[in-house]
Image: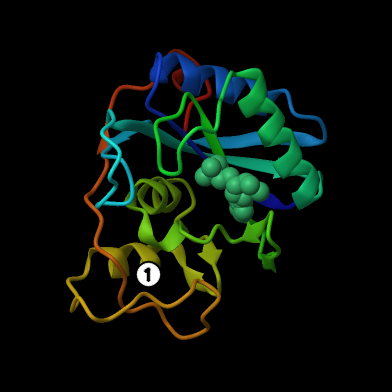
Amino acid sequence: MPLACIGIGSNQGDPPAQLATALKHLQALPHSQLDRVSRPHRSPPWPPDNPVQQADFLNAVAGLQTTLAPDDLLARLQQIEQQMGRVRRQKWGPRTIDLDILCYGQHRRNSPHLQLPHPHFHRRAFVLQPLAELYPDLRIAGHPVTSWLTRLHRPQPKDDPAPPPSSTSPPTRTTIASSPKPCSPPAATAAMTPR
Ligand code: AMP
């Protein structure tokens, strides 16, 4: 069964409870099995120059083994966001819940409504750190997740833009992001025993 990695984030309402509820929804998805769940990580709003004043995010990553096709999975995740009361008001704004497909096996897609792997996965420590903890051998866009993480933390000149994740060259540089801080797990996360 393909492994889809799902990014979960929340910074409005009761983020620990919302992460737990989102995990319950993921667990209930048809043709799918929740494999691993990371600890929650607290991180500042992204991108680093985000103009919207808002609270820190609570983020986690879940690995889902699924035979839902990528488009069906995205539709299900959007359904969960709606059920949980997400309203899309502002780009980069606060949100009750945000669910992204970070990667779906080795699938690559670049359609307007679905990009795989997720277009920003390689620039977000709150994605790469939990992914590397959960699946140290995972490869995304042709490179080990651990190299993407190393690359993220490496200092770089300002005028050196990050290549797109579809690049086949080895990851060497990208935008620096502050490291997320692990925090105590919400009830449902703890119950699922992240490996
Ligand atoms: P966001 O507001 O960050 O949740 O972005 C949601 C939009 O990104 C939706 O319109 C999706 O169709 C689109 N999108 C593109 N690629 C992905 C992906 N890998 N995972 C989730 N949403 C995606």
Quarter occupied by residue 174: bottom left
Give how far across and how far down residue 105 sits, in percent.
Answer: 67, 59
Colouring scheme applied when the structure was drawn: rainbow
Give how far across and how far down residue 158 sits, in percent.
Answer: 20, 75
User: Can residue 185 be seen in this snapshot?
Assistant: yes
46 displayed left or right of 191 = left
Residue placed farthest to the bottom in the image? Answer: 169
Image height of 160 relative to 192, above or below:
below
Image height of 161 relative to 169, above or below:
above
166 displayed left or right of 120 = right
Depth check, front residue: 155 or 4? 155
Write the residue at 74% across / 34% down.
Answer: 76
Write the residue at 56% across / 17% down.
Answer: 21
Identify residue type, mark 1.
Ser
Write the residue at 23% across / 63% down.
Answer: 153
Secondary structure at numbered mark 1: helix
Is the C-beta of the residue carrying label 1 under 8 Å from the nearest atom of ligand 1?
A: no
Q: Residues within 10 Å of mark 1 (few under 14, many from 20)?
A: some
Give how far across and how far down residue 157 sits, in percent.
Answer: 18, 79
Tally of numbered tags: 1
Image height of 168 relative to 98, above or below:
below
Depth check, front residue: 46 or 183? 46
Give how far across and how far down residue 148 sits, in percent.
Answer: 38, 67
Which residue position is annotated with label 1? Answer: 147
User: Can residue 195 be seen in this snapshot?
Assistant: no
Write the residue at 42% across / 62% down.
Answer: 122
Image height of 51 relative to 79, above or below:
below
